[in-house]
Amino acid sequence: MLRAVVSVRITSWCVFKYLCVLLAVSSVQSSTTRAVPTTSSMTSRTCPPLQDPSITCPSIQKQGGVCTDTNAGNATLNNFINICKQENILDLIFVIDRSVSITCEMFHCSVDVIKRLIRYLSSTGDLVIGERYSHVSIITYGVQDTVVYDGIGVSGQAEKLTSCNLQSKFPDTVVPTAGSALYTVLERAETIFKKSDQVRKDSNSPRANKRVVLLVSDGEETDEGSDAKEIAKIIRELPATILSMAQDGQWLNIKRKNLLISLADDSQHCACRSQWSQALEEYEKEIPDTSMRKYTFGPWIWSPGTAHQTNVNGTVHAKPYLTPIDAI
């Protein structure tokens, strides 16, 4: 009888101890497998269309005394326009900041300036986008870079691209990633440029006369151990021209603006987004279709039988004008 009681007590103790071990293991597993938020699991902010009333693009923002130079926009814009006028075949890369510090308004307003700029230059015939003309690539970046469209470094991509359908290539989503890999994205731009000659040769297209990077950023750099100025210097030595468009906003300060100036060719190749926009408004007055000047890109078609004559290194080139459909 005593032996039976002892046996029952021992068995009960073993069961209790086993259950305690199971409970402890379960607790450890639940704590170690708990989901940890990552930048890849963050929900993207899908920005409203640019025509949305909630999106406003101020003419000028003198954020922290950074964007006060009224001549900066004119000088930088003139430099870009002159490049397009002098060189009829470009490799043009747009690098656009989409990090967590970039709001929907900032992102949309900068993309709007780019589209307006392309539209104006297309209307004058100074920028013709196509397989045998200028090629375009678009890269966005946060903690990592993303090649949204590559008409320069990938064969066949430039075949169907024109100034008319380029608008659809720009993204309308900003992914909130806590980082700004300036060095990495500029290194990507360099890699794309190096592929250009072979891509153009494969498609029997003329070699580009000029390589240009238009960097849109708030000047934040989080690449550890890397210096964006080093890779920018390498790009300029290709040779290529770098222009900067500083994102007006609460994060833009003198230090960041100076970094963007150092990445560009010089201070005459860097201005705030609002300064680019204000300077561009004067040029847009030359476009007859006033209802389509701001916040829109088209529709446009090539006008039959019209051409714009440009003289490049003593050779006359004929380029078709890009004309709004309503004007025909």
Image (cartoon, rainbow, N blue to C red):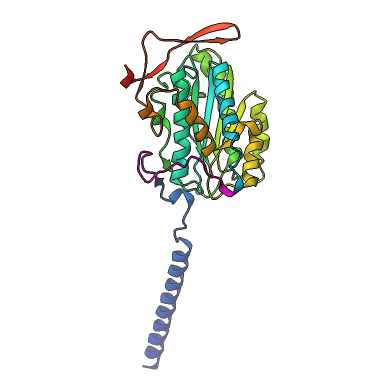
Using residue 299 as the reference point, say whether residue 176 is left or right of it.
right
Is there any visible trace of residue 156 in the rendered image? no
| 60 is within the stretch colored magenta | yes
Image location (x, y in percent) of residue 276: 53, 34
Image location (x, y in percent) of residue 192: 55, 27
Image location (x, y in percent) of residue 234: 67, 30
Per the rendered image, the range of residues in magenta is 46-64
| 318 is within the stretch colored magenta | no
Tell which residue pokes out farthest to the top in this image: 315
- Identified at 62% across, 25% down, the residue is 240
Between 3 and 233, the one lying in front of the other is 233
Tell which residue pokes out farthest to the bottom in this image: 2
Between 140 and 304, the one lying in front of the other is 304
Is there any visible trace of residue 91 in the rendered image? yes
Does 136 appear above or below 230? above
Does 228 appear above or below 196? below
- Identified at 53% across, 12% down, the residue is 206
- Identified at 47% across, 20% down, the residue is 155
Which quadrant: the C terminus? top left
Image location (x, y in percent) of residue 106: 47, 43
